[in-house]
Amino acid sequence: MAPQPSQARQPCLATPLTRKLAQLVPLTAGEIAVLRDVQSATRLIGRNREIISEGRKYDGLLVLIEGVSIRYRVLHDGRRQVLNIALPGDFIGFPGCFFEHALYSITAMTDCVVSAIPFAQLLGFFETRPRLAAAIFWSFSCEAAMYAEHLIDVGRRSALERVAHFLLELLTRLQTIGLAEERSYHMPLTQELIGDALGLSVPHVSRTLKQLREQDLVAIESQRAVIKNVEALSRLADFERTNLSRFHLRDQFAKS
Amino acid sequence: MAPQPSQARQPCLATPLTRKLAQLVPLTAGEIAVLRDVQSATRLIGRNREIISEGRKYDGLLVLIEGVSIRYRVLHDGRRQVLNIALPGDFIGFPGCFFEHALYSITAMTDCVVSAIPFAQLLGFFETRPRLAAAIFWSFSCEAAMYAEHLIDVGRRSALERVAHFLLELLTRLQTIGLAEERSYHMPLTQELIGDALGLSVPHVSRTLKQLREQDLVAIESQRAVIKNVEALSRLADFERTNLSRFHLRDQFAKS
DNA sequence: CGGTACATTGAAGGGGCTCAATCCACGTGG
DNA sequence: CCACGTGGATTGAGCCCCTTCAATGTACCG
């Protein structure tokens, strides 16, 4: 039953990463080919398996092709903070992967397919494929921007606002990669995980979700999250500002 | 009394940025010259003046040469979350500066000297000065790593641990740029600001500092912070892991 | 001297935590 | 087919950390 690591799989023509980067920079056929090539060697990682352990070494910049993974740190007494949640098309391990030793642990929340871009190849992109390099660089910038939003969440929002914001962010992120409907999506995360991401305890996550349910804003049933009132929930979570137009890249970079 | 913006100043031979990057990658005379050149056009910004307003445009990648600035977001009801604190040698505005419109506001906490690297020039570095580009890229990675630490602070640590961790982080950061002694430094931040950075109220920051004072761990008097027991404070804050060796860059990047 | 900015301290309240019990869905083995 | 174990969600009771509100103190400055 345990999935085999290092198992090869057939590359798909349009990976989530390709789609994501193509939204940013019009990619040439050549660039798409390079991206496909780079993602051809994949590893399969089973649910709850560690992709990277803190302190270990990366063998390249990892790309999540399929599944959901989390990056986190656990403190000496067991408290855990989830730093971010990676969805298909996301890079895994930025910024830790650029250091000699991984700064955080990364674990697969569902069965995952990942591929690794060797560092040498990535560096080569800066010379041979500047547009690709720019797109990747932009992707890191977005990642850092999400960190900032996450920090605002945890630092200055109430539990209700946090959970609301979290669910909306997940909705929009899943929509951009075609994994969510207009108002609903498959929720791959347990309440314990949501709590560790938002700095809340499990019972309080449960109570907060109940509150959202009773206000007819959100319903989560059998791993399916339905945002019943996007408008009201966005207002509650102060979410307007996070619309995607904010993440519009400077023309200079897009055209480089 | 209000300082004049856009006022030219003589460049110094070893700016904080040059020193910081040189710690990472041995810089050639040519690279140092480029860096000096890039930082020659400086702006002076007075205390409490905004360097960048949310929604405005950046004219380049800003470098803080002198002073202390903060990046933050204020929510609709006035709550404020400080995202990070920039010290001399830090880049200002990553990641927001790569987007069409600034994502956050940046304000000078003290009189600041900043310079701007035009985006076109920065992009050129990837081709003409790859080592410089790599060093800058690394610097961004460090920035993102600090975000993560900050998130752990706010999400999963008690007020006491947060403040302790914060003071220690400030100590080590100031030490690496030569602005702190062995166990003490000039504290440029008000308690309100510390609170907004750590997600605490001003009264509680005061109480927490009092507690640290009574335990003979920290003393702050007339803007001078003295860590009286680095060892014990580090244990309290779970700070061992954040020693600088963790931020060692991969050889591949350092030598590129 | 009065004004401003910041730090301190107290009292009271609440939001979220801990601890613990219960429930439910599901898979597994007897 | 049912008993049982397991992982996760739910709910309750009590409490404590931190907030809010407010007053006071203090240094500095025009």
Image: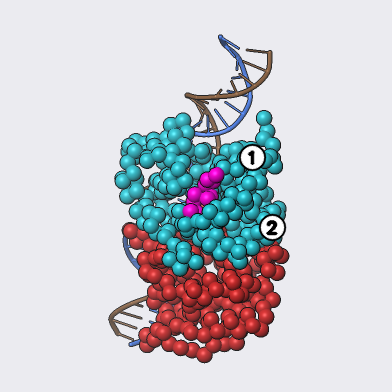
Chain colours: A cyan, B red, C brown, D blue
Question: Could you say where residue B249 lies in the image, as x and y percent from the top left?
Answer: 67, 65
Q: Nearer the viewer, residue A222 or A90?
A: A90
Q: Amino acid at mark 2?
A: His
Q: Nearer the viewer, residue A140 or B53?
A: A140
- The secondary structure that most of the magenta stretch takes on is helix
Q: Chain of mark 2?
A: A
| Left or right: where A58 falls relative to A23 | right
Q: Which residue is mark 1?
A: A9
> Helix, strand, or loop for circle 1?
loop
Question: Could you say where residue A103 lies in the image, as x and y percent from the top left?
Answer: 64, 56
Q: Earlier in the sequence, mark 1 or mark 2?
A: 1
Q: Residue at x 60, y 43 (%)?
A: A11
Give the residue furthest to the front. Answer: A29
Q: Quadrant of the N terminus of chain B?
A: bottom left
Answer with the quarter of the image where residue A57 lies: bottom right
State the extent of the magenta-drawn residues as a range.
A13-22
Crowding near the residue tagged with mark 1, few <14, some 14–19, many ≥20 C-alpha atoms within 10 Å: few
**Magenta stretch contains residue A44:** no
